[in-house]
Image (cartoon, rainbow, N blue to C red):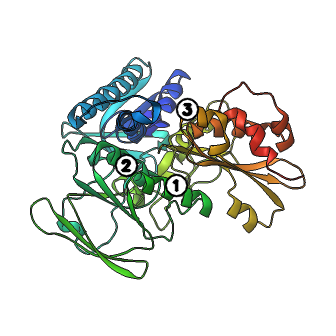
């Protein structure tokens, strides 16, 4: 059995830099990866989807070019070329990460699937079929999550797609049915609608984006429907079946009415499940919750000293940047021997529809549920100079402000480049700026960020 100082299981956006930095700090480190270096973000998530979304926006801009006084007689979407471009970007990111790992002294990469045989001992089934037995003083689990498949009658009888498999589907759906109404579902839905597919979104909750405020969700729905997408909320899917060659039939109720939908393809985007089953955690004292996520404390440590979990596999916010921040916290704890915690850290995120939805801090609903005395600033993009000039007036900006301290508690920015505008507000929140300071701050004209002046001017003193 080979002994290491640390074993990192999974090479996602947290696992890869952690393994490199532990090795550079003098730790004899092993990195175990069963599939591709880079994890979900590089291979199945951020990198490929945003590459394809960029293509979809180009198609949209061309098809609406007359709004900007440009006439384009014809255009054609080449999905195979779009996928080829996406693969080039993914391969570039993945190979770059792999080369960086291979050059790192003190780091051993094992391509295979790891399973615990004891508290800190593992058996790795390598890709060539052989086994490698390894152990370490520290084991750090970064195995991520996979698309979750709901229990719907008939779903196991049809060739459904997930957010992973749809990325390489070279046949443009004539009608894409999407089960799910959250971030991934909406990004894919708008993207394929812009490629030319008919798109229908089916969501079981009463609104899209169930974590967001009602007005934000309603505006997103309005934007999607204006783009030609059909949306069913409060949906109860009764049955799914194959109704002939390239025809998927779905029976559901929505809004008190029965519907029968038919489509050429089905995307299942109903959340994700942690990759913990293959780890055989029963061989350790590591506990999971009812959904299979590994339980950790504020320092990312499990119930077994020396075994940590980070990234999506531990539950909580499932974002690449959170996994990356997890690895920084672990470095402070393990290498620098400093105090660090995931408690109370900011959780910014962005949905890459067009317009984007950038989010930070409390929603209005969360603030009111906490009984906070708040003021709500809201500004339509139809009143923003930059939006009018560029022709991107869909959406609005919204901020939650503590009525007593004038401090900003949260924001939802639904606009062109909304994620970047949100990031400015994130820094303002962390710096303790007040709404009044942002209302009076000098921003360059004419930027979207400049509209923060007018956003906070909507609050009545």
The nearer-to-camera label among 1 and 3 is 3
Q: Is residue 388 visible?
A: yes
Q: Quadrant of the N terminus?
A: top left
Whole-number angstrom distance, CA of label 1 to CA of label 3: 20 Å
Q: How many marks?
A: 3
Q: Residues within 10 Å of mark 1 (few under 14, many from 20)?
A: many
Would you name the residue on which mark 1 appears?
220
Residue 49, given in percent of the width and then of the height, sits at 38, 40
Comparing 66 with 18, the one in front is: 66
Q: Is residue 339 visible?
A: no
Instruction: Find numbered disc 1 in the image and state the secondary structure of the residue it sits on.
Output: helix
Whole-number angstrom distance, CA of label 3 to CA of label 2: 25 Å
Residue 336, given in percent of the width and then of the height, sits at 67, 30
Q: Which numbered disc flags the more N-terminal residue, 1 or 3? A: 1
- Badge 1 vs badge 3, beta-carbon distance below 8 Å: no
Comparing 261 with 68, the one in front is: 68
Residue 258, given in percent of the width and then of the height, sits at 33, 80
Q: What's the mark number on residue 93?
A: none
Q: Which numbered disc flags the more N-terminal residue, 3 or 2? A: 2
Q: Residues within 10 Å of mark 3 (few under 14, many from 20)?
A: few
Q: Which numbered disc flags the more N-terminal residue, 1 or 2? A: 2
Q: What's the mark number on residue 188?
A: 2
Q: Residue at x 48, y 49 (%)?
A: 312
Whole-number angstrom distance, CA of label 1 to CA of label 2: 14 Å
Q: Quadrant of residue 322?
A: top right
Would you name the residue on which mark 3 appears?
390
Comparing 416 with 341, the one in front is: 416
The nearer-to-camera label among 3 and 2 is 3
Instruction: Find numbered disc 2 in the image and state the secondary structure of the residue it sits on.
Output: helix
């Amino acid at each position: 059995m080979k002994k290491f100082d640390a074993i990192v299981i999974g090479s996602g956006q947290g696992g890869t830099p952690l393994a490199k930095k532990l090795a550079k700090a003098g730790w004899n480190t092993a990195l175990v990866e069963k599939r591709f270096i880079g994890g979900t973000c590089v291979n199945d998530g951020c990198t490929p989807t945003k590459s394809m979304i960029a293509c979809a926006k180009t198609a949209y801009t061309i098809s609406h070019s007359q709004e900007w006084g440009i006439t384009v007689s014809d255009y054609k979407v080449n999905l195979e070329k779009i996928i080829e471009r996406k693969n080039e970007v993914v391969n570039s990111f993945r190979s770059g990460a792999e080369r960086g790992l291979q050059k790192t002294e003190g780091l051993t990469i094992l391509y295979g699937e790891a399973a615990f045989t004891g508290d800190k001992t593992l058996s790795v089934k390598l890709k060539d079929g052989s086994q490698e037995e390894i152990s370490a003083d520290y084991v750090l689990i970064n195995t991520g999550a996979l698309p979750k498949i709901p229990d719907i009658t008939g779903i196991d009888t049809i060739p459904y797609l997930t957010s992973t498999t749809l990325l390489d589907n070279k046949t443009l759906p004539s009608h894409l049915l999407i089960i799910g109404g959250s971030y991934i579902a909406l990004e894919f839905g708008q993207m394929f609608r812009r490629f030319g597919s008919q798109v229908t979104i089916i969501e079981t909750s009463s609104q899209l984006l169930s974590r967001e405020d009602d007005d934000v969700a309603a505006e997103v729905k309005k934007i999607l429907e204006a783009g030609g997408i059909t949306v069913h909320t409060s949906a109860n899917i009764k049955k799914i079946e194959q109704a002939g060659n390239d025809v998927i039939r779905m029976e559901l109720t929505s809004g008190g009415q029965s519907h029968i939908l038919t489509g050429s393809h089905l995307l299942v985007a109903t959340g994700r499940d942690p990759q913990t089953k293959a780890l055989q955690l029963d061989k350790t004292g590591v506990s999971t919750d009812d959904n299979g996520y590994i339980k950790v404390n504020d320092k990312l440590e499990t119930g077994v000293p020396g075994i940590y979990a980070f990234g999506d596999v531990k539950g909580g916010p499932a974002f690449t940047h959170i996994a990356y921040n997890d690895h920084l916290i672990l470095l402070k704890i393990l290498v620098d021997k400093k105090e660090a915690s995931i408690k109370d850290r900011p959780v910014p995120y962005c949905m890459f529809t067009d317009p984007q939805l950038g989010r930070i801090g409390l929603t209005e609903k969360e603030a009111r549920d906490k009984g906070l005395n708040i003021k709500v600033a809201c500004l339509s993009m139809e009143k923003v100079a930059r939006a009018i000039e560029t022709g991107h007036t869909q959406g609005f900006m919204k901020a939650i402000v503590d009525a007593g301290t004038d401090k900003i508690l949260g924001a939802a920015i639904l606009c062109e480049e909304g994620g970047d505008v949100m990031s400015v507000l994130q820094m303002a929140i962390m710096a303790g700026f007040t709404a009044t300071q942002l209302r009076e701050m000098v921003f360059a004209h004419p930027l979207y960020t400049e509209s923060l002046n007018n956003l906070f001017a909507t609050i009545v003193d």
